[in-house]
Amino acid sequence: MLPNDHKGAAPEGAVAAPGRETGYARAERASLADLLSEAGPDRPTLCTGWTTHDLVAHLVTRERVPYAAPGLVVPALHGVTERAERATGQAHSFPDLVEMFRSGPPRWNPARIRRFDDATNTNEFYVHYADVDRARPGFTSREVDPAIRTRIWSALRLLARSGYRGTDAEIVAERTDTHERRVLRRGGPTVVIAGLPEELLLHAFGRRSVAQVELRGDPTAVATF
């Protein structure tokens, strides 16, 4: 829940969570743009075959090339999206792509509206931040705004539908900070995936080698993850 609109001065030393003032997706966008700029164009990512240049070309294409959007969700059209991403990457230098991404979507894109932006991009940008950051050995988990953590947890059931589509197990997510549980998928033998919401998100999005989670339950089902 967002804080009330109190107008008084903040206590000395207090730091406002940036997402609560500017939008959660915008805060994640700024963090990801900073990380990309620091990394440079040639760093490997967790996206197989993609460098940081490829990743930011994907992000810019996703927001600025309308005909490429269907291929993000429809496998038969994925080739169209890939060609658009390559064209974007070839047409712009890495620094220009980072600044295009940092500046946000064009005026016609609904993500210019904060509520829509938060709903569609907060989780996307968090995962892509991890794609860059956690591709390095010895990464340190970043601090996550508790409000963003709550948003991730609220959206996890919907986001997990495609991530666990290939399993027959019943998937139960468990928050290790509050011990709340949520069934992500109904099915056969139960697998409990325990971790912080952002780690559960990474696991559901296929970043399983770096997601800091614990798997419990039916040994045969657990072995499939």
Image (cartoon, grey):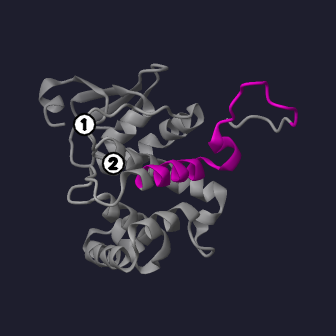
SS at circle 2 = helix
Residue nearest the observer in this picture, 175 or 124: 124
Residue where numbered disc 2 is placed: 131
Tell me the crowding category of disc 2: few under 14, some 14 to 19, or many 20 or more residues within 10 angstroms, Cα based.
many
* 126 to 84, vertically: above or below: above
Percent coordinates x, y for residue 101 in the rendering: 50, 64
Mark in front: 2 vs 1: 1
Asked where in the image residue 82 lies, by quadrant, the reply is bottom left
Residue displayed at 44% across by 41% down: 156
Q: Which residue is mark 1?
A: 137
Q: Secondary structure at mark 1?
A: loop
Q: Position of residue 144 (x, y in %)?
A: 51, 34
Which stretch is magenta?
A: 7-36
Q: Position of residue 137 (x, y in %)?
A: 25, 36
Query: Which residue does the image show at 39% across and 63% down from the upper left?
Result: 56
Q: Which residue shows up at 51% across the image and 47% down it?
A: 31
In the image, residue 15 lies in the stretch drawn in magenta: yes
**Dot 2 amino acid type:** Asp
